[in-house]
Image: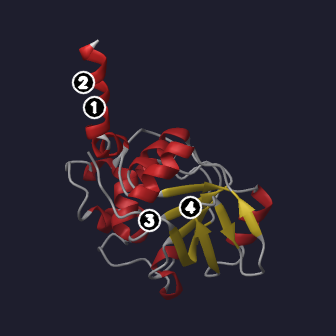
């Protein structure tokens, strides 16, 4: 069971990675998948991109830029999270400080893993994503309950999200945590059913 902070709204500047097809191995290289805990994985997020061979931060990597520090929203090129199904990828991004990823296309397995771990995957129209990528650092307001992203110019854009996944994000639980919250009602139903 995974409990995480309830996610109702994300208001933040954006950080941008313009590349498409950023796979899970680029998000967190396989050599760091030796742990079953989430804590500390953020230091390995985008490891081979973020650091030079000597271990120092690469100033050419967008997320190392001073203006990207503290951003909770990552905007990326198409097909983000493709590749192998590693839950460590959303774990690393959450531990890195991200709460939402926006793209025109997010890989299905990554999207599912993200939602189970308190990271909001947002798919918007490609033209809007291109606009966001061209303007890193702008402030966005994401309302999870309303499933809408508000841009600085006031435009409010809907994004698709499964109703149950949205409920779990709003309550800060995964599927098992949701069921356990209703264990008394489930037990009451079982008692009535078996009494027949």
Is residue 28 visible in the rendered structure shown here?
no
Indicate which disc, 3 or 1, sits on the residue closer to the N terminus: 3
**Residue matched to label 4:** 144
**Residue matched to label 2:** 191
Q: In the rendered structure, are the residues bearing label 1 and label 2 in contact, judged by CB atoms less than 8 Å apart?
A: yes
Q: CA distance from mark 4 to mark 1?
A: 32 Å
Element carrying mark 4: loop
Point out residue 84 in the picture as x, y percentages from the top left corner.
43, 38
Q: How is the image coloured?
A: secondary structure
| In the rendered image, the vertical position of residue 120 relative to residue 50, given as above or below | above
Element carrying mark 1: helix
| In the rendered image, the vertical position of residue 109 relative to residue 158, given as above or below | above
Q: Residue 175 is drawn in which quadrant?
A: top left
Left or right: residue 100 versus residue 177 is right
Indicate which disc, 4 or 3, sits on the residue closer to the N terminus: 3
**Residue matched to label 3:** 49
Q: Marks 4 and 3: which is nearer the front?
A: 4
Is 165 or 31 nearer to us in this picture?
165
Question: Residue 188: which numbered mark, if any?
Answer: 1
- Local crowd size for mark 4, using a 10 Å CA cut-off: few (<14), some (14–19), many (≥20): many
């Amino acid at each position: 069971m995974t409990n995480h902070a309830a996610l109702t709204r994300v208001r933040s500047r954006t950080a941008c990675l313009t590349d498409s097809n950023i796979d899970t191995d680029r998000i967190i290289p396989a050599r760091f998948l030796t742990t079953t805990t989430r804590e500390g994985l953020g230091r390995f997020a985008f490891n081979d991109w973020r650091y030079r061979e000597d271990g120092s931060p690469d100033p050419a990597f967008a997320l190392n830029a001073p203006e990207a520090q503290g951003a909770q929203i990552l905007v990326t090129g198409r097909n983000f999270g493709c590749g192998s199904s590693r839950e460590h990828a959303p774990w690393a991004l959450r531990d890195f400080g991200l709460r939402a990823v926006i793209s025109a296309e997010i890989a299905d397995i990554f999207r599912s893993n993200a939602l189970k771990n308190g990271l909001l995957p947002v798919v918007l129209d490609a033209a809007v994503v291109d606009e966001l990528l061209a303007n890193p650092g702008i402030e966005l307001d994401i309302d999870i309950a309303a499933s809408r992203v508000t841009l600085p110019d006031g435009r409010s854009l809907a994004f698709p999200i499964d109703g149950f996944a949205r409920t779990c994000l709003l309550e800060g639980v995964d599927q098992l945590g949701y069921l356990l919250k209703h264990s008394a009602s489930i037990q009451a139903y079982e008692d009535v059913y078996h009494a027949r």
